[in-house]
Image (cartoon, grey):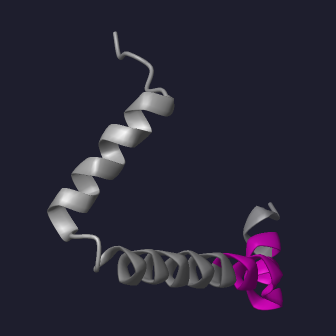
């Protein structure tokens, strides 16, 4: 059996934050968060473009026809 993965609780987040600060240093954290936010924005932008792209929708409709 595969155990279910759960999100970390309050105390676990503190430990994770301390480990991140020790690994990267407090001065590097703002740069890391900015990079992660930009990557997330780009991911969402591409995901939304794919959903709205008429060429992709047309190709999917033509594939589903018998």
Q: Is residue 4 magenta?
A: no
Residue shown at 28%/79% (left/top)? 28
What is the chief secondary structure element of the magenta stretch? helix
Q: Is residue 51 left or right of residue 17?
A: right
Q: Is residue 14 left or right of residue 42?
A: left
Q: Is residue 53 magenta?
A: yes
* The furthest residue to the left: 23
Q: Is residue 15 above or below residue 56?
A: above
Residue shown at 76%/90% (left/top)? 55
**Count of numbered tags:** 0
* Image quadrant where one finds the N terminus: top left
Q: Is residue 23 left or right of residue 32?
A: left
- Of residues 34 and 2, the one drawn nearer to the viewer in this rendering: 34
- Of residues 37 and 42, the one drawn nearer to the viewer in this rendering: 37
* The furthest residue to the front: 26
The image quadrant of residue 33 is bottom left
Q: Is residue 64 above or below residue 54?
A: above
Q: Is residue 41 above or below residue 12?
A: below
- Of residues 63 and 24, the one drawn nearer to the viewer in this rendering: 24
Residue 29 is situated, as x and y percent measured from the top left of the image, at 35, 73
The image quadrant of residue 2 is top left
* Image quadrant where one finds the C terminus: bottom right
- Of residues 61 and 50, the one drawn nearer to the viewer in this rendering: 50
Residue 50 is situated, as x and y percent measured from the top left of the image, at 70, 81
Q: Is residue 44 left or right of residue 32?
A: right
Residue shown at 75%/72% (left/top)? 60
Residue shown at 56%/75% (left/top)? 40
The image quadrant of residue 14 is top left
Q: Is residue 42 above or below residue 7?
A: below
Question: What is the span of residues highlighted in magenta in the rendered image?
Answer: 47-61
């Amino acid at each position: 059996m595969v155990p279910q993965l759960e999100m970390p609780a309050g105390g676990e987040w503190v430990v994770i934050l301390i480990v991140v600060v020790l690994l990267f240093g407090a001065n590097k954290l703002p740069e890391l968060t900015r990079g992660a936010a930009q990557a997330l924005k780009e991911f969402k932008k591409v995901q939304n473009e794919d959903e709205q792209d008429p060429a992709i929708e047309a190709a999917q409709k033509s594939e589903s026809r018998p």
